[in-house]
Amino acid sequence: MSTAYDDIKTQLQGSMVALVTPMHPDGKVDYKRLADLIDWQIEQGTHCLVAVGTTGESATLSVPEHSEVIRFFVKHVDGRIPVIAGTGANSTDEAIKLTQEAYDAGADCALLVAPYYNKPPQEGLYQHYKTIAKAVDIPQMLYNVPGRTVVDIAQETVERLADIDNIVAIKDATGSVGRGEQLIKAVSDRLVVLSGDDGTALDLMKVGAKGNISVTANVAPKAMSETFAAALRGDFTAAKAAHDVIEHLHRDLFIESSPIPAKYALHKMGMIDKGIRLPLVWLAESHHATIDKALVKANLI
């Protein structure tokens, strides 16, 4: 049965970047560099942009800043590719506020990370997502990343949530291909299943995922878009060839907590200033050589 949300489901595929939020050295958002990054990503073939996800330092942007960055994304992208707005929070009321502002800004979809720190039970997770879905009529994507949130959305909970019309997708950042495959078998008729783990994303696409929301695509958007465009065509030989050039980045860009290494890499590439917000700090000098070598190996500098 078709729904009003079928169109967005067909657009949530391929290489999607969880874009960093460029900042000046004093920590203020650098909108000029953000515009440049958005244009570069689109030129390089990225299929969707994620504004203010984990990699965009959502945890340290104020609520007004968070909403302003989303508005800037939507206005600057101007319909060229879909914009997914990170609007999750561990307070349901705050998540509703952020999601409503993303809807008002014209975002195509809201990405809602599982509530972190307060460790809700599965019924609490279900009621959290159901309440947000009922409150704001925007396509919504679940985001399961237990390594960050210390809470795990069980498959049974995802299956229950898949019956809600405007919950259209899930970003599975568990890193488990076997678990992802079981999820795809259970809900792919209702939800778009996307990887949120660069290292296992291509393997998850082999068993039915539709794309990847990526950190690596911040620095290597062309190779990532070529990889996942080929995978969508079912040409995994071409996908692997494109992927092999940058596969090491999936490891090296997590040498410290994301987005620390990605921001250093983009600064090294001359694309952003040296700005990041506490409690995150600039990449330790002892890791600079690792990232520098990784960028050279990937033909990025």
Image (spheres, grey):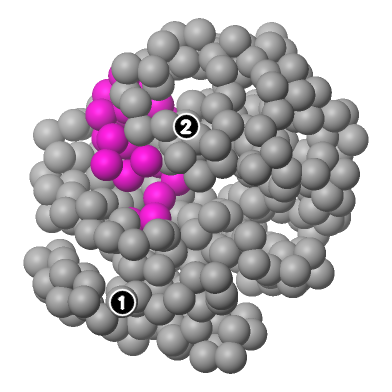
Residue designated by label 2? 172
Task: Reply yes or no: does residue 245 show up in magenta.
Answer: no
**Can residue 171 be seen at all in this image of the molecule?**
no
Q: Could you tell me which residue is drawn at 40 percent across and 21 percent down?
A: 180
* Residue ranking furthest to the front: 118
Stretch of the chain drawn in magenta: 197-216
Residue designated by label 1? 284
Query: In the picture shown, does residue 44 fall above or below 29?
Result: above
Which of 16/115 is in front? 115
Query: In the picture shown, does residue 176 fall above or below 23?
Result: above
Task: Reply yes or no: does residue 213 show up in magenta.
Answer: yes
Q: Position of residue 51 (x, y in %)?
A: 60, 59
Badge 1 crowding class, 10 Å Cα cut-off, few under 14, some 14 to 19, many 20 or more, is: few
Residue 34 is left or right of residue 90, and the answer is left
| Amino acid residing under circle 1 | Ala
Q: In which quarter of the image is residue 168?
A: top right
| Amino acid residing under circle 2 | Asp
Q: Position of residue 251 (x, y in %)?
A: 23, 52
Which of 273/110 is in front? 273
Q: Could you tell me which residue is drawn at 58 percent across and 32 percent down?
A: 151
Q: Is mark 1 on a helix, strand or loop?
A: loop
